[in-house]
Amino acid sequence: MRELVLDTETTGLDPATGDRVIEIAAMELVNLLPTGRHFHALLDPERDVPEESTRIHGFTREMLVGKPRFAEVIADFLDFLGDAPIVAHNAPFDFGFLDAELKRSGAAPLDRSRMVDSLAIAKRKYPGLPNSLDALCRRLGVDNSMRTSHNALLDVKLLAEVYLELRGGKQPGLILASREVSRPVPVLEGLQGERTPRPIIPDQAALAAHSALLDRLQDPLWLRPPFVPNDTDVASGR
């Protein structure tokens, strides 16, 4: 199953007041495991970046001048998304901003049926507890020591690990299977070619010893006559 973990950084909290997206990151998961494919873009918001927002994500207006505008990356972004479900932490926030940018570019909004809100999942699993991305990382043992600011590309990597844990945790069988695909099987010297079957056939002494062991067993089941239920047995459920 293909899914995408997504995060955005913005100039503020409300696209209705003119706030814009300045960073988009999306990471591909297949069967809950990252494939290594991702989309990432820093964007020119074509407006100022308030100081309080810069304190959160670290981006200033000067750092974003000359970056692509949203309309210039929309085709590649939508192509990467495809029609897969989109996982985001507090997903309505990210969807709201992306819908505003898509509308501004003349494109259709994202289908809300694709939205998977990891924050809602966490609240159902841990009611009454803090469920921010940092809190979930600490609770689930995900290393977030490098997260000194809200960076969308780093956040999707952390969220991918958190989402895996929220969906049931790491499954060693899947990890071993993925390693097995990417790692060639070594050919040992002297074992090349087809393997010759070597059936184990007991000799007469082994058969006699086994028979003697069976003779010492008290009332073995396989020597009892077969059980044939009568009408009383059937009525009683035996």
Image (tube, helix red, strand yellow):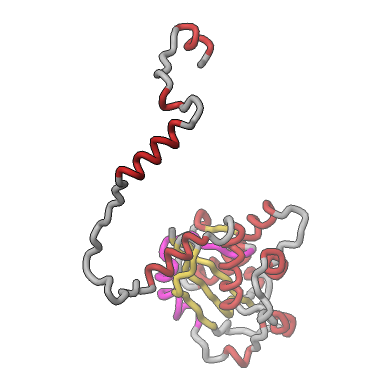
Location of the N terminus (image quadrant)? bottom left
**Which residue is more in the foreground, 24 or 26?**
26
User: Compared with residue 204, is residue 11 higher up or lower down, i.e. above or below?
Assistant: below
**In the displayed structure image, the side of residue 15 where residue 28 appears, left or right:** left
- Vertical arrangement, residue 221 with respect to residue 78, above or below: above
Q: Is residue 162 magenta?
A: no
Asked whether residue 109 is in view, the answer is: no
Magenta residues, as a range? 69-89
- On the question of residue 103 being in view, the answer is yes
At x 51% / y 54%, what residue is drawn? 113
Q: Where in the figure is residue 77, as x and y percent of width and height?
A: 45, 73
Q: Position of residue 82 (x, y in %)?
A: 41, 65
Considering only vertical position in the picture, is 218 above or below 98? Answer: above
| Quarter assignment of residue 191 | bottom left
Q: Position of residue 102 (x, y in %)?
A: 50, 69
Instruction: Identify the residue at the far right of this view.
Output: 128
